[in-house]
Amino acid sequence: MSIASLMNSSILRAAEARKADSAANAAGGFAQQLADAGERLQGGFAKGTGQTQAAAPSRAEQEFMEYAALSPQEKLFRAALASLGISKEEYDAMTPQQKQALAEKIQIAMQQALDAKKVGDAA
């Protein structure tokens, strides 16, 4: 073997060794970065970002959930009360006679609304 070919093969082996070391370091660096990210993620969960206990719903959320659970009839009834400026609590506080008078008033208003719609549809 000539000196030139020995030098070339030596240079090639050294380059291959550096390339292998660089790949191992890169793989090791990636593995370390992955492990560090996992630790940060676990630390975040421990600080409360991954808690399974839900926060208490806000008042608005509670009101919405209560409204969503109402039947269509109950929603219509509450809308009729609201159109007269009466809350559900005020209605609950009324006497049976007051409730009956209010029911009659709502019935008349609904009948008038239906009649007006029929006239509008016929025109």
Image (spheres, rainbow, N blue to C red):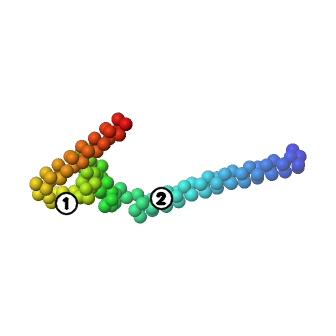
Residue placed most toward the observer, 79 or 39: 79
Q: Where's residue 55, x and y in %? A: 34, 60
Q: Which quadrant, please, contains the C terminus?
A: top left
Q: Are marks 2 and 1 in contact (CB under 8 Å)?
A: no
Q: Where's residue 110, x and y in %? A: 25, 45
Residue at x 19% of width, y 50% of height? 105
Q: Which residue is mark 1?
A: 90
Seen in the picture, residue 92 relative to 74 is either above or below; the reply is below
Circle 2 packing at 10 Å, graded few (<14), some (14-19), many (20+), is some
Would residue 84 appear left or right of 30 to someone viewing this image?
A: left
Asked whether residue 53 is in view, the answer is no
Residue at x 31% of width, y 61% of height? 59
Name the secondary structure under disc 2. helix
Would residue 65 appear left or right of 49 to someone viewing this image?
A: left
Residue placed most toward the observer, 116 or 58: 116
Q: Quadrant of residue 51?
A: bottom left
Residue at x 15% of width, y 60% of height? 93
Distance (Cα) linking label 2 and label 1: 52 Å
